[in-house]
Image (spheres, rainbow, N blue to C red):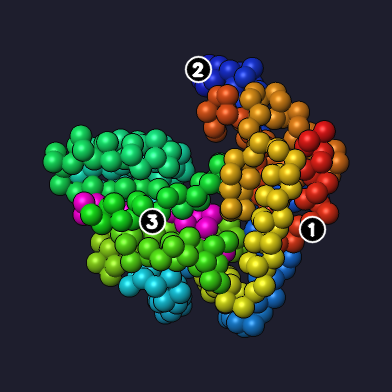
């Protein structure tokens, strides 16, 4: 048997003792309040049906990176459609949201630049920043005064300033104050980067996102749209200027040094955008979000305020949230507990994701069970 380092085994035992041990599962309760498939494009078969209308002759693999043999007219066509849909000059497709965030933030900010990020941004954004040579500071969550304080202290020291936020935060479900941030960044010539992963398909006309709904698309340096959430497929794109696209093609390592996505995945993205333009699922989801918030207001259940599909109830301690997850699972409700260290210790929570295919009766019963 191959030797496994004792130091690593010790780390595994430590997370087990703290009830932080993660494992992979295959069996889930059938009433879904956990997945990111907000519009049911994947689970309800809408995307599969839409794909049939494209009648593709699909290659099984892309044969190489896009800079060698993996590029195609299909890539160009879909990137143009994405840019048009999101009112950008250009779009560049990546294999995942993680790859997009890693590739953008590791390559664009330079030595001598400053990155200021909300303290609750996603791990993929954090990892991209860590790979950058720029200086980095965090500001308090959704606190523009905290951002201004950092700017006042550091603005004159650095060449370029990048402000990094999510439009909807994945572990809280709350929204960033994007209008204030966009206007502030414009006033000081800072570059605003917005991850729209949990906003696309939920906010704006045809689910175009929160930047569209708030009319700040043209004030963003870059917007990241992820397709593994509401759109029910895979991959991501970075929308911005033509110059940004040219730069990323030449310097973004997670774009350059990876095999291009296969045609089937590309066509799934195309089909998902076609669905967004005509589906009624966005309106159904919004109706359920309103219904959920009405019930929690009436019952005084202490969820974090949210108008997104994500709703979180803080319950301190990994044991408590795990207990509730198991209890709800026995009643066939799939709700995921979020434990430390994924969130801060003392801020463990139940994370509920609402979907267009959930029923109001299911929402009502779920909240009643949690209240019990």
Residue named by callout 3:
179
Numbered mark located on residue 7 in the image:
2
Q: Give the range drawn in magenta.
A: 188-201
Q: What element carries label 3?
A: helix
- Relative to 214, does residue 174 appear above or below in the rendering? above
Q: Considering only order in the chain, which callout, 3 or 2, is on the residue closer to the N terminus?
A: 2
Q: Cβ–Cβ below 8 Å for labels 1 and 3?
A: no
Residue 237 seen in render: no
Task: Find residue 346 and report its image quarter.
Answer: top right
Q: Residue at 43% across / 70% down in the picture?
A: 86
The question of residue 191 being in magenta is answered with yes
Residue 52 placed where, x, y %?
Answer: 66, 79
Residue named by callout 1:
359
Q: Residue at 41% across / 76% down in the picture?
A: 84
Q: Nearer the viewer, residue 7 or 246?
A: 246
Q: Considering only order in the chain, which callout, 2 or 1, is on the residue closer to the N terminus?
A: 2
């Amino acid at each position: 048997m191959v030797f496994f380092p004792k130091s690593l085994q010790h780390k595994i035992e430590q997370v087990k003792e703290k009830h932080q041990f993660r494992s992979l599962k295959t069996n889930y309760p059938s009433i879904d309040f956990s997945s990111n498939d907000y519009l049911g494009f994947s689970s309800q078969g809408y995307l599969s049906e839409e794909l049939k209308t494209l009648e593709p002759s699909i290659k099984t693999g892309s044969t190489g990176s896009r800079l060698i043999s993996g590029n195609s007219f299909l890539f160009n066509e879909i990137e143009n459609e994405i840019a048009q849909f999101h009112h950008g000059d250009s779009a560049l497709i990546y294999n995942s949201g993680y790859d997009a965030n890693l590739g953008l933030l590791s390559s664009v900010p330079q030595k001598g630049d400053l990155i200021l990020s909300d303290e609750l941004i996603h791990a993929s954004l954090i990892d991209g920043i860590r790979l950058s040579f720029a200086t980095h500071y965090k500001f308090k969550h959704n606190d523009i005064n905290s951002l201004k304080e950092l700017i006042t202290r550091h603005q004159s020291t650095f060449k370029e300033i990048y402000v990094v936020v999510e439009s909807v935060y994945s572990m809280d479900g709350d929204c960033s104050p994007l209008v204030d941030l966009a206007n502030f960044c414009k006033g000081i010539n800072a570059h605003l980067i917005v991850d729209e992963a949990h906003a696309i398909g939920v906010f704006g006309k045809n689910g175009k996102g929160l930047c569209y709904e708030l009319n700040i698309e043209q004030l963003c340096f870059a917007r990241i749209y992820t397709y593994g959430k509401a759109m029910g497929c895979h991959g991501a794109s970075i929308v911005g200027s033509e110059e940004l696209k040219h730069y990323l093609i030449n310097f973004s390592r997670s774009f350059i040094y990876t095999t291009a996505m296969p045609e089937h995945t590309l066509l799934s993205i195309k089909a998902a955008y076609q669905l967004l333009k005509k589906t009624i699922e966005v309106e159904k989801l919004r109706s359920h979000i309103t219904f959920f918030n009405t019930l929690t207001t009436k019952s005084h259940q202490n969820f974090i305020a949210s108008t997104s599909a994500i709703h979180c109830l803080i319950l301190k301690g990994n044991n408590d949230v795990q207990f509730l997850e198991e209890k709800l699972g026995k009643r066939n409700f799939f709700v995921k507990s979020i434990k430390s260290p994924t969130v801060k210790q003392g801020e463990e929570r139940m994370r509920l994701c609402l979907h267009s295919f959930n029923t109001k009766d299911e929402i009502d019963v779920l909240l009643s069970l949690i209240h019990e």
